[in-house]
Each structure stands twice: as C-alpha cells, then as structure tokens.
Image: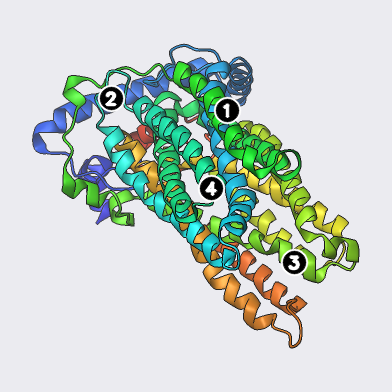
Amino acid sequence: PFGNLVGSGQGEDAMPRKSTAGHREPLIGAGEKEAAEREHAEDHARSADWAAEAGSAPALRSDRGSQDVEGYAGMREGPNEGEEKPSVSWARIVCINAHAFNYGLFYASVGVILLPVEAANMFKGSEAIALAAMLVLGGISQLISPVAGYSSDRCAHRWGKRVPFILSGNATLFVSLGCMYLARTYLYGYSYMVLLFIAMLSLNVAYTGFAGLVSDIVPAHQMGVTSGIMGGMTAAGAVVGLIGLGFMLETEHAYGAYALSLLATTPFTWAAAREEQLEEGRRRPWVTQEVLKAYYISAESHGDFYWVFCSRTGYYMAVSTQIYILYYLRDCMEDPAISGDAKRYTSILCILSQGCSGVVSLVAGHATQRFGYKPMIYAACTCMAGVYVGYTLIHAFPYVVALGVVYGSSNGVYLAADYALAVACLPNKDDGAKDLALWGIAAFLGTMFGPCITGPTLAVLGKQEGTDAYAFRGYVGVMMLGVVYSFLAAVFLFKVRHGYAPHPERTNLDEDEDEGGQGGRSAA
C-alpha cells in the first residue's frame, strides 16, 4: 500500500505528520493542499540554499562547532534566527535561577535537619509519629502545584503570568517562617504543623511560577545550559543549608536564615523576569473541569512528556534509597568511630555529594548541547546503579565517600538534562506551568513510593534477633532495589523521541520530516 501511495504521486503529503509532542497531526484537508505545497517548496528551497552555503558536510560541522563555542561563551542577549525567543545573557539566567538557590536551601535542610529536631522538641516521646506527619503534610502540599500552574498560565496581571505567583508565594512563606518560629518557641506543636503546611504550599506555588518563567524566557538552544545552572544553584543552596544548619547555626536561628535567603534572592528573580502582561487575544478563562484535568497525565494526552514523567518518578525512587545511608553507616562500617557517629558522617557525605552535584551540573549543562539530553540521563542512571552495586561490596568509609562523590556527580548530570528535556517535551507551551507542575510531582511520587518498597525490604531481609541493627543482607536488598529503580528510569526514557543531540546538518527536524517524510528524533 505504501508503494501505491508513492506511485500515485501522493507520498508523505498524504500521511499524518508527527508533531513535536509525540502525537500525529490530522491529514491535510483538500482546501489546504495548495498552501501546503507552497510551504513544502519553500522548505526545499531553504534547505538547498543552506547546503550550498555550507559547501560540504565536514566544513559545515566545523563552522557549526565554532559557532556553538562562540555562542555559549558569549551568551549575549539578542534575536535568534529561526526562534521566536531572543537569546538570554549569562547574568540574566543566573539572576532568574536565584530562586532555585533558595528552593534548594529550604528543601534540603528542612527535611533532613530542621523537622527531626523540632519534632523531638515539641512532641517528646512521640517524635517519630510527629515527624512522619510533618513529612506527609509536605508531600500533600505538592498537590497545589497543578492548580497554581493552571492559574499562572492564564494570569493576566500587569506584572506578567509568573512573577505574581513567585512574589505572593515567597511573601506568604516569609510570614509563615516568622509564625513557625513563634510556634516552636512556645511549643505549639499542632499550630506548627499547620503553619508548616502553609509554608510548603507557598513554596510550591512560588516554584511553579519559577519553573514556568524559565520555560517562557529561555530559548531552546540555551535550555541545556540553563538547566545546568538551575541544578547548580539548587545544589549550592542545599550545601549552604546543610552546612549552616548542620555545623554553624542553632536550630532556632534557621528561620531567620531562611527569611534572609528569601529577601536576598527574590529581587534578583523579579528584576530578571521582565515579563509583560498577557495579550488580550491570548487570555483564557478559568474552567473548573480543566483544573481537574490538570491532575491527569497519560501517553495519549501528553505524548513524550508522559514518559519523561514516568522516568523522573523512577529516578527519584532510586534517589530515595539514599535515606537509608545513615543506617547503612551505623550497621555496616567496620570502624566503630564511623558507626558510632553515623549522623555526623552522613552529614559530611551529603555535603560532599551535593557539592559535586552542583559543580558537575554547571559543566554538564554545556555537554547536553553536544550529546543531547537523553544520553546524559542514561549515563546518570547507569552511574547511579553502579553506585548502589558498589555499596554492597564495601565496609570502609573512604570507599563510601568515593561512591558518594560518584553519586553526586551522576545526580549533577541528571539535573543538567532533566528540566531541559521536560521543557522540550511539553505538549503545549501555553500550558507550560501546569504541565511542569506535574513534572515536579513526579519527584514527590518517586520519593514517596520508593521507601514504601525499600523500607519493608530492609525490615524483612535485615531483621536480626536481639539487636536493633539490620543485617548486611538487608542493605544488599535495598541497594539492589536502587539498581532496579535506576533501570526503570532509563527504560521509560526509551519511549521519548526528543532529547538527542542535534545533527550539524539538521537544526530543525520538524522541517526535515515535512521534506523527506523521515521519522526521527527531534533536536532538543
């Protein structure tokens, strides 16, 4: 049947075309045939002109490579040929991502350091249950993100679509921090939980606006570098938080440190945003049924973005295995100085890992432009699986540190490609914040579902009579689950068409598909 199509002179014009979201577009109607043929001829003419100017494929690769080096070294503002968004300067990208620093500072230290201490302070004798309740409230707060994203996509405020959500979220968080300090001072435990929930809601609303802002402003050819900077800034905030609360500040001073971070970073993001009010013709109403659909995701409704969502869930299930490192050091290290002070050495390990993650993320952001997003994520998943295998073969802390450095570096590679791939696979750019909110929830689901499996595995396989310590075989089971989660993250990514390195001869795959009918991978 395909031979008949070609012989009849129809060919690919009669076939559905692939859209960038992974769906197929409808057949060209009879009334649109002439216009489509004209566009088809113009595409061929542009391709021929470009090939003539290039001279030869090797020369083209050389020219393109030098242009890439010059472009990423300069990162200047200005228009881009073939893209609707202008280039963004280094300074502006860094200023926008100041919010990522604040986000990393808060999230990394609150769950690991602040809440365990406060639970023990306000709920003596039942701190384990209180801590679990606080963490559950933090997880539930993630569910505000799709609603916030949907509302942000339709916001017609004179400050823009994203800035009002960033500012309102940060302002509410600032006030909540002050109230939380008072609650912990006067031991109002349940009031503290309510205020914590409000603070987490505010943090997620602000981050949803921030994620949409970056995708709105940064053009596709700079998204990999921007994703790397975002990962680096997030890791930098995490390191500052872990060092500050772990070694320098008393717990009661944490609230002031968080508030100062908000005051210091928010003006930079606001100044760099430069949003304009949503045009009258692009404004859309707020529909309740659509809000409910914002929580639904499938391969049919979201195309490639669905598989990115699944892959990210699997990856963060693998990351969640790290929460058992403290117990691993306590029960498996041969040196009694390490096992007897596992909390301190776990903090040191976390700081080293986060530091490596931030540095590598900055470098890997450039590498995504050469190798593509998917190969970088495959490499990160492979390294993470190798780290978990390594944990089953060692009993000395220096080797644990070495594996921690590898883990942090692989996580930095992942962070450099993760956000950029999600933006490249968005099914509808106008609903970017709503869908990126789902992308954020994927991390929460992974960190929630992972321990639901690994926890019971450790308890069953590692149980020993007469001691609270877990047997080494239990940790072997936990680490092997980490390998499985890493493998799942990579397998889901196989379904994604986007995310490969752009070919020197092909800057726009969609045009090539229309010209030659060749299915392929979209240049991200």
Type of amino acid under label 1: Leu
The mark that comes first in sequence, 1 or 3, is: 1
Query: Which is more N-terminal, label 3 or label 2?
Result: 2
Give the side of residue 405 with respect to residue 69, left or right.
right
Q: Are marks 4 and 3 in contact (CB under 8 Å)?
A: no
* One can see residue 310 in this view: no
Q: Secondary structure at mark 3?
A: helix
Marks 4 and 1: which is nearer the front? 4
Q: CA distance from mark 4 to mark 3?
A: 36 Å
Q: Kindly give the residue lying farthest to the front in the view shown.
A: 186
Q: Residue at x 43, y 20 (%)?
A: 273
- Residue 399, position as x, y percentages in the image: 85, 58
Q: Secondary structure at mark 4?
A: loop
Tell me the number on the disc at residue 186. 4
CA–CA distance in space, label 1 to label 3: 35 Å
**Occupied quadrant, residue 121:** bottom right
| Element class at badge 1 | helix
Residue under circle 2? 41
x then y, percent, for residue 411: 64, 47
